[in-house]
Image: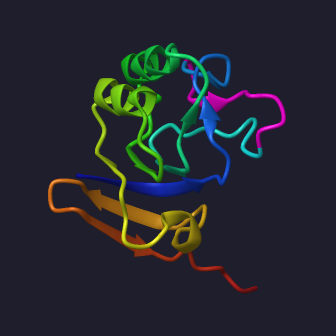
Amino acid sequence: MAEGEALVTREEISGWGGVDPRDGTIVETRHELRGQSFAGKVLVFPGAKGSSGWSAQFHVARVMGTAPAAWLFNKMTTKIALGAVVSHAPAMTDFDRDPLEIIRTGDWVRVDADAGLVTITRKTLKSS
């Protein structure tokens, strides 16, 4: 189980050359999250793209303390499966409803992967 602020993207993430594991920042050129860090956040994304070096980047991120707190993704591949394993973070896929349609960046998300439960607390906007 893990919880944290959601970081949501509709774009697949390239691990090798797409992330900087030293600070958990997405560095992939033209990615909508370029310059944002997934460190300690619940990463919500469609899946992985790129080479088999994907898992190595997330292993280094775990060692550096910059890995996501949890992963919610739509498309299972060997890259993402191994990346989730080496990051030691809860991961879920195969949802009844698409998390990309429900969760927004900034929402607080609790992932209980053992029970198969995702709890979402909406980010509230402060009025002035």
Q: Which region shows up in magenta?
A: 22-31
Q: Nearer the viewer, residue 105 or 84?
A: 84
Q: Does residue 25 belong to the magenta stretch?
A: yes
Q: Nearer the viewer, residue 118 or 80?
A: 80
Q: Does residue 56 belong to the magenta stretch?
A: no
- In the rendered image, residue 18, in percent from the top left (x then y), is placed at 67, 25
Here the colouring is: rainbow
For image coordinates 50% across by 37% down, the residue present is 39
Q: Which residue ends up furthest to the right in the rendered image?
A: 30
> In the rendered view, would you say 122 is above or below 13?
below
> In the rendered view, would you say 94 is above or below 80?
below
For image coordinates 59% across by 55% down, the residue present is 8
Q: Taking 45 as reference, is 75 left or right?
A: left
- In the rendered image, residue 111, in percent from the top left (x then y), is placed at 30, 58
Q: Taking 10 as reference, is 65 left or right?
A: left
Q: Which residue ends up furthest to the bottom in the rendered image?
A: 127
For image coordinates 35% across by 33% down, the residue present is 81
Q: Taking 126 as reference, is 99 left or right?
A: left
